[in-house]
Structure formats: C-alpha cells, structure tokens
Image (spheres, rainbow, N blue to C red):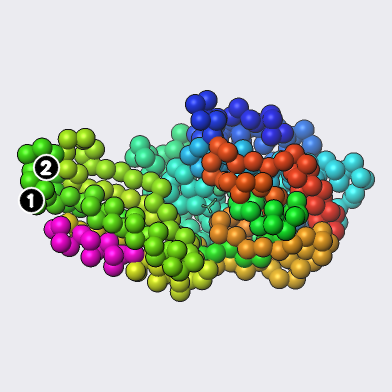
Amino acid sequence: MLEAIAEIGRDPRTGGYRRFAWSDADMALREWFAGEAAERGMELDEDGNGNQFAWWGTGDDALLIGSHLDSVPDGGAYDGPLGVVSSFAAVDELRAQGHTPKRPIVVGNFADEEGARFGIACAGSQLVTGALSADKALSLKDRDGQTLAEVMTARGRDPRAVGRTDLLDSIGTFVELHVEQGRSLIHSDAAVGVATAIWPHGRWRLDFCGEANHAGATLMEDRHDPMQAYAATVIAARRLATDAGARATFGRLEVEPGGTNAIPSRVRAWLDARAADEGQLDKLVDALMHQARSAADPDGTTVGLTTESVSPAVEFDVPLRDRLASLLDAPVLPTGAGHDAGVLSPHVPTAMLFVRNPTGVSHSPAEFAEDADCQAGVEALTTVVRALS
Ligand code: GLV
Ligand code: MN
Ligand code: MN
C-alpha cells in the first residue's frame, strides 16, 4: 500500500512529500483511501470536516484505528500513512485469521493533521471534539490568502457542515499507530513501543517590525532593522530551550519587502515550542519574548506575539496503555510530537503504538522505517485489535 501511494504528492527534486490539506495530492490520497475501503467492503463515511472513516461493522462503541495521510512540506513517507496502511493491513490479517469482531472496527484518515496549509495542527480531529471552532477554522487562510471555507467549497464540500460531530458517541477506543519520531526504540532494542504521553506544544507568530530603507545609503547606526532582533531571538531560543530541557524551533519565515538591497520593514517568524509541562512551556515563551523585546528596543524596532495554537499535555489512558504494553511485551515511551490521538485522548480511551525509526529523523524526506519493523507494527496492531474486539 505504501508503494501504491509513493508517487502521490512527491516532489521529484527532494523526494519529500507535499500532501497539503485539500491539495490535488490530498484529493488523490482520499480517493485511494475510498478505494481501499471499497475493496474490503468497508462502508465509507466522510464527516463535514473531511475526516474519512471506513467501517467494518456497524453500531456503537467502535474501535477506531488509523492516522492521517497529509504531510508537512517535504515530509517523509511514514508520518501518517504508516498508521493508515497498517490499519487496513490489520483488518486483512484479522479477516485471514477468521476473527469476528464483537464491535465495529473503523479505519480513519484524519484531515489536515500537520496544519501545513492552514497553520493549525490536527484541525480535523480538533473540529470533531470542538477544541477548534468551525468559525475559527473556516476563516483560516492559506499562504495564497484562500480561506478553508473557500478551499473546501472548491472541493465540493459544504462549509456549513464543518464543526463538532457525533463521532465520539460511536467510538469507544482509539489506537493510532505511528512511526517513531525519535530514537528511543533503538535504545530499547524493540520494533514497537507504546506511548505514555505527549508534551504540551504550540505555535506562535512573532512580528518583528522596523523601517524599510536602502541597504547601501543607510548608515548602520541609522537603521531600524527588525532582522537584528529576529536573529537575536533565534539564538536565544536555542539557549533557553536547551537550558530548560525543552524545544524551540523557528522553521518558517517571511521577510518584507524581501529585497536583497533593502532593509526589511517586517520579519514574520513562526515559533514551534514544546516542553515537558505547561508551566515550563509558558515560562519558555515568556522568557523568549523578554529576550526578543530586549533585542528590539535599542534598535527602535518592535515585536508582537500572536498565539496561533496551543495543545495541552496528554497522558494516554493508563489502563489501556499498560494492557497494550503487556500484551505486546513492548516498552513505553513519551513523545514530543503531536497527534490526533492526543486530541481524542481526553474524550475516549486512546493509545498509540510507535514503530522503530532507525535514524529518528522525521518531518524530512529522509524519514525511514525498515520493512520488517513496519510488518512488526502490523502484527502488533493486529494483536491489539483482536484483543480489544
Ligand atoms: C506533528 O507532527 C507535530 O508534532 O508537529
Ligand atoms: Mn508529523
Ligand atoms: Mn503524524
């Protein structure tokens, strides 16, 4: 199955994936998902938010498995798709074993997990739970200025259907399998692990504002160059996050007007920050903003902060996690990466399985997992689904 989708949304230059929400690539992946459901005689349901669900059986208290098919810019082949294909493979395996589930089994593909196009991660699952309101989601804009409402309409979806759904009434458990985004399983010498927790994390936009002027004619001491405070903030971010045992990343930047021979008027930068608990995360962002303002003031520039999204700490259901760890004889591990499982976790008993990643690299074309480990992931998921259904 991974081979069948390998060319969809792949950038031939980098080998990475650009599978953004509602793009041509995303539409092709949705069609692929629908085809896999149909091939297995699973009933396909797409909710108003674009989340796809393939049902084996009907009724309440369903066991949801699955993940997402979209990607970050230049993402790898596994982050998301591994969970979806492993879920279909587990269904095949259970059927081959003659398993008759006592509850419905649902394979899910959550929409826009990475937030690469509209800025908010896990938008599809957050809309389901109400953590993200329909009004806020529909007015989010992509980099071309198109709103989610416009984009969904162009894809034949009704924006009025966006918002909270009754999925949580029919789902009793969620298990998301995902490639590990770190190297813990290498150290544990295990192909599969069980998640304990997700660090709180968020995205903030920093607007460094100054005055555009000529790069040659403006004396160095006469400048109000916002790039200086931005640069100081990047350096401070590494120091502050390192000292706090946290993470801080600037991975996206817009410079206006963007001329080589012009001092910028504005540097807009996006901060991704994560920490072991919410207090530490707040402290990190406060300390970083203090540094940013201290750097901006002497230059006569300013810096503004906009919180785009914050995801609270997640502790996965302890009895479920312990049950899966003992069933699979697998190690348990926390993660700094966000997932739809984290969004559903406060509402329904939720667990995650991680498949070993030999380099730990993720959100990169170099992301990899050995076939044998992916197969071990399918076997683990099959074992879990059989035990839970
Ligand atoms: C999702 O992959 C995230 O943690 O940003
Ligand atoms: Mn990801
Ligand atoms: Mn993912």
State whether residue 144 is above or below residue 345. Answer: above
State whether residue 278 is above or below residue 337. Answer: below
- Name the mark on residue 208: none
Viewer-proximal residue among 314 and 246: 246
- Taking the spot 57% from the left edge, 46% from the top edge, the residue there is 362
Disc 1 residue type? Asp
Name the quadrant of the N terminus: top right
- Please, what is the dominant secondary structure of the magenta stretch? helix
Viewer-proximal residue among 217 and 312: 217
Residue 276 in magenta stretch: no
Residue 325 screen position, x and y as percent: 78, 63
**Marks 2 and 1: in contact by CB < 8 Å?**
yes
- Taking the spot 77% from the left edge, 33% from the top edge, the residue there is 39
- Taking the spot 56% from the left edge, 56% from the top edge, the residue there is 337
- Name the mark on residue 222: 1
Magenta range is 288-300
Residue 111 screen position, x and y as percent: 56, 45
Residue 244 screen position, x and y as percent: 45, 69
Q: Left or right: 285 with respect to 59?
A: left
- Return the disc, 1 or 2, that comes first in the chain's sequence: 2
Residue occupied by mark 2: 213
